[in-house]
Image (cartoon, helix red, strand yellow):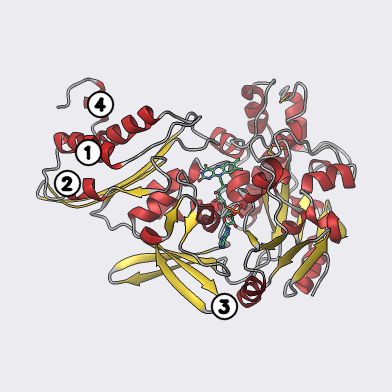
């Protein structure tokens, strides 16, 4: 059993034991290494000032794969076997790199506090495209990041003084061909060899009465949970770490899944003529976003506005389910397609249908000593018209006020199948079975959906909170049915001109 976390920072090896391994990475960088280029503003994943790149070794790849994360909500123990590149590690031959130069030339900084985060995020986007182009990927031939690529990579970074125009201009200003990818800045071979040599060994860190375990296999994870059924499971940590930093959560025993192998796959199968996708508990939301883009664009749209790139690279679907919030963005889709959750404990694995997974506010049918291992998702068929909705006050990086999933099937203008799921209208995500029963057999016309909306108001009990009043949520629940009708019949223009009845 290893008693230290092995990581590299800007090419230098660190072996961290005891309390050093139990702190947020941003604290270790700033206080432990005096590398204060990485800034901390919110300490809850919301602003991107603390962004760093983390590179991990992936099976079958000779290079590390780098993704941006928020170092304030990534604890050191989660970064075992990772190479971290901070803003201090981006220079090329002691000179500013292309992105840094562009930020200076385009006046992309005023107070400068957010600047390291923006620079890291832009370097991450450039690095990804350079790595892809080496493999003949999407960036082959492209000289600059497009406006969309720049904006997409910066949705997790906030600036309070420069204004975004100059920063976006900087992002589009530099020549990708001159950008040095991280694999050119750092000798990766010895890092990968060091990681591979340690990968199969579990890690146990103990300090100050606290314990963190990093299993390498599902069996050792389950064994640990049997002995420590109250252990807090940390997957991406994007929920847990915020609770630790901001809400006084102080788990004594943690099991981090960062090194767990066997749960990082997305598999497809055909069950009863329906394509089904099985998602391992370690699959990141970013991977899921890429996977669903073509096969279920509706779910992709939800994932695209889910947090920020930094959150989606760390966070997982399993964590969203395990958090169990009634406004968790993935849940309406999972309910609507009758997904199920595989949980595993010392007695083996069992599958719980999504419909019976939640038993109350953040209460689950999972027993102590069990963990989520896979999510089984039947995909909608082409005649099932699925629409997903997320209502927030801004498009990106905002917590939902209200969510919805509606699926309808029709035959000769009659509704033959309906599935209606709403989030943010009660203590759990709710399936509105009375509304579904009402819809089945009715004519597929606007009046039907108006009536369904009125009925929906009676089936939910929303609360008032900072994100929206009860009255607002009731109105959203009523209106969403009309929006669904307009969307699936693609009649935006008639609505705008008042021509639709
Ligand atoms: C800035 C920011 C923006 C966010 N934006 C969104 C958003 O747009 N939409 C949204 O829905 N959420 C959002 N979140 C919340 C969070 O990112 C998601 O819930 C994410 O899916 C959590 O995944 P994780 O792997 O990081 O979970 P963790 O933090 O690791 O875990 C979350 C919970 O699940 C449990 N858990 C994790 N894995 C397992 C497992 N395998 N078995 C059993 N229990 C497990 C943990 O014990 C914990 O209770 C945001 C969070 C932040 C900080
Ligand atoms: S300090 Fe704001 S995201 Fe980390
Ligand atoms: S330059 Fe001041 S916050 Fe962005």
Residue beneath disc 2 = 438
Quarter of the image with the N terminus is bottom right
Crowding at dot 2, Cα within 10 Å, few <14 / some 14-19 / many 20+, comes out as: some
Query: Where is residue 19 shown, x and y percent of the image?
Result: 84, 56
Q: Is residue 27 left or right of residue 387?
A: right
- Above or below, 458 against 209 in this view is above
Q: Position of residue 349 (x, y in %)?
A: 49, 75
Is mark 3 in CB contact (under 8 Å) with mark 4? no
Residue plotted at (50% across, 52% down): 362
Distance Cα–Cα, label 3 vs label 4: 57 Å
Give residue 346's mark.
3
Residue 122 picture quarter: top right
* Mark 4, secondary structure of its residue: helix
Q: Are marks 2 and 1 in contact (CB under 8 Å)?
A: yes
Residue 487 visible within the image: no
**First reached walking from the N terminus: tag 2 or tag 4:** 2
102 w.r.t. 75: above or below: above
Q: CA distance from mark 1 to mark 3?
A: 45 Å
């Amino acid at each position: 059993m290893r008693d230290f976390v092995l990581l590299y920072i800007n090419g230098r090896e660190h072996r961290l034991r005891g309390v050093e391994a139990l702190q947020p990475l941003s604290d270790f960088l700033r206080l432990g290494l005096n590398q204060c280029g990485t800034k901390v503003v919110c300490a809850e994943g919301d602003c991107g000032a603390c962004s760093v790149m983390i590179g991990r070794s992936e099976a079958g790849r000779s290079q590390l794969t780098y993704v941006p994360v928020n170092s304030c909500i990534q604890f050191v123990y989660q970064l075992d076997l990772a190479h971290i590149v901070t803003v201090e590690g981006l220079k090329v031959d002691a000179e500013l790199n292309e992105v840094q130069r562009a930020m200076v030339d385009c006046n992309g900084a005023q107070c400068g506090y957010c600047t390291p985060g923006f620079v890291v995020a832009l370097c991450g986007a450039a690095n990804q495209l350079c790595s892809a182009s080496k493999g003949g990927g999407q960036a082959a031939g492209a000289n600059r990041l497009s406006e969309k690529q720049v904006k997409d990579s910066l949705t997790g970074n906030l600036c309070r003084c420069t204004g975004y125009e100059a920063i976006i201009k900087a992002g589009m200003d530099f020549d990708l061909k001159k950008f040095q990818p991280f694999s050119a800045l750092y000798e990766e071979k010895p890092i990968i060899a060091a990681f591979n040599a340690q990968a199969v060994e579990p890690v146990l860190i103990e300090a100050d009465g606290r314990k963190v375990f990093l299993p390498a296999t599902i069996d050792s994870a389950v064994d640990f949970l049997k002995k420590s059924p109250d252990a807090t499971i940390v997957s991406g940590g994007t929920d847990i770490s915020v609770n630790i930093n901001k809400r006084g959560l102080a788990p004594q025993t943690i099991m981090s899944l960062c090194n767990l192998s066997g749960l990082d796959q997305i598999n497809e199968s055909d069950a009863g003529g329906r394509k089904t996708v099985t998602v391992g508990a370690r699959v990141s939301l970013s991977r899921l976003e890429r996977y669903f883009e073509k096969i279920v664009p509706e779910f992709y749209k939800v994932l695209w506005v889910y947090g920020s790139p930094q959150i989606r690279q760390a966070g997982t679907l399993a964590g969203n389910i395990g958090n169990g919030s009634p406004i968790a963005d993935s849940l309406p889709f999972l309910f609507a397609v009758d997904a199920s959750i595989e949980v595993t404990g010392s007695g083996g694995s069992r599958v719980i249908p999504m419909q019976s997974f939640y038993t109350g506010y953040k209460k689950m049918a999972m027993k102590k000593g069990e963990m989520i291992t896979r999510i089984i998702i039947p995909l909608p068929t082409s005649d099932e018209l699925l629409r997903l909705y997320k209502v927030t006050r801004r498009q990106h990086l905002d917590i939902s006020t209200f969510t919805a999933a509606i699926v309808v099937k029709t035959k000769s203008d009659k509704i033959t199948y309906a599935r209606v799921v709403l989030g943010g209208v009660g203590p759990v995500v709710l399936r509105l079975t009375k509304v579904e029963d009402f819809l089945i057999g009715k004519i597929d016309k606007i009046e039907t959906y108006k009536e369904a909306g009125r009925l929906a108001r009676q089936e939910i009990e929303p609360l008032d909170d900072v994100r929206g009043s009860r009255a607002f949520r009731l109105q959203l629940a009523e209106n969403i049915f009309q929006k669904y009708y307009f969307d699936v019949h693609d009649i935006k223009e008639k609505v705008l001109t008042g021509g639709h009845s």
